[in-house]
Amino acid sequence: MSANPQPTDWRSIAIVYLAGAVAATALLKVSPAALDLRAGFGIGLSEVAWITSIFTLMTVALGVFTGHWVARFGARKLAGLGLLALALASSATLFAIGPVSLFFGRMVEGFGYVLVVVSAPTLMAGLASPQNSRLVLGIWSTWLPAGGVAIMLAAPTLLALAGWQALWLFSAVAALIALALLTRVPPPAKSGPLPSVNLRQALAHVKPWLLGLTFVFFTIQLYAVLLFAPTYLVQEIGLSVTRSTLVTSVVLIMAGVGGLLGSVIMHRGVAPNRVMGSCLVIVAALIPC
């Protein structure tokens, strides 16, 4: 007689999803705060670009290793460590006295960001039943839009209250709340340390490189819009900070809708490579417009 399948723990999945959304607020908070950072630290747009892109660089540098750490130590531990790093780094950056300390704080935040966004989908998949695993991972695809919309909508009020520091404080408090909630998530029944993966053998295959290259170009397009849109809309179009963040929020909301639609399509049996390929063809067709 076969054992009953593991039920989907939607409550715990929601907590892990929140952790991902908190990581997204840490990534995108520089975007609405760019003008305030430039005025406060006397830096140019190129320095802001480095402060922003350090998260991407940390992802490239640590993403593969973090996957190995998740397999060795467990996804819940790594997600908790990432949230702690986000909270401590955001809090410490409140006392930044120059661009160097600001950049260093972003590096530590980037480390925490990578830990969260690599471990969270593994943890969510472990909390889902086999029937709901694709749906859950599709829901996870909306973590960036969800956190981005939250920080974009909160940014005008927070900036008016206390400048860029208010955004960093908001991020730190959100990370601590998510960390406290994460302690209530039980270890997934089918998790624990995952089987060890031979990294050299994995990288010898062509498909991981092709998938990685696909995400490189996707990330360039996405981050070019999300990270610099508010600054561009204020300086070049003449919108207010409030309106620029609202416009960027619309882009994020549409990204979230796309993520949910993709999850439903995959849940109905369509292969992920077909969903990704179709979306990339549509984006390529729309760019000349």
Image (spheres, rainbow, N blue to C red):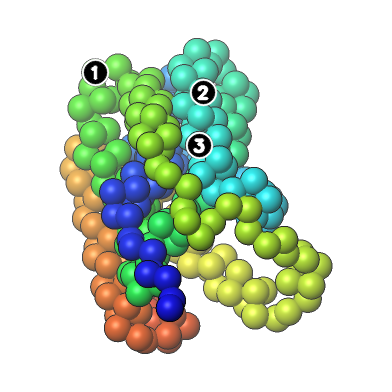
Circle 1 residues within 10 Å: few <14, some 14–19, many ≥20: few
Work out whether 69 lies above or below 275.
Answer: above
Judge left or right: residue 198 versus residue 82.
Answer: right
Residue carrying label 3: 80
The residue at 81%/67% (across/down) is 200
The residue at 68%/62% (across/down) is 195
* Front-lying residue, 252 or 266: 266
The residue at 53%/67% (across/down) is 215
Residue carrying label 1: 161
First in residue order: circle 1 vs circle 2: 2
Secondary structure of the residue carrying numbered label 1: helix
Q: Quadrant of residue 64?
A: bottom right
Circle 2 residues within 10 Å: few <14, some 14–19, many ≥20: some
Seen as rendered, the residue at the extreme right is 200
Q: Quadrant of residue 18?
A: top left
Residue carrying label 2: 88
Determine contact: label 1, label 2, CB under 8 Å. no
Secondary structure of the residue carrying numbered label 3: helix
Which dot marks residue 178?
none
* Front-lying residue, 33 or 11: 11
* Front-lying residue, 16 or 31: 16
First in residue order: circle 1 vs circle 3: 3
Coordinates of residue 151 in the picture (x, y in percent): 30, 38
The residue at 20%/46% (across/down) is 246
Judge left or right: residue 251 versus residue 44.
Answer: left
In this rendering, the label closer to the viewer, 1 or 2: 2
Coordinates of residue 55 in the picture (x, y in percent): 55, 44
Coordinates of residue 271 in the picture (x, y in percent): 42, 85
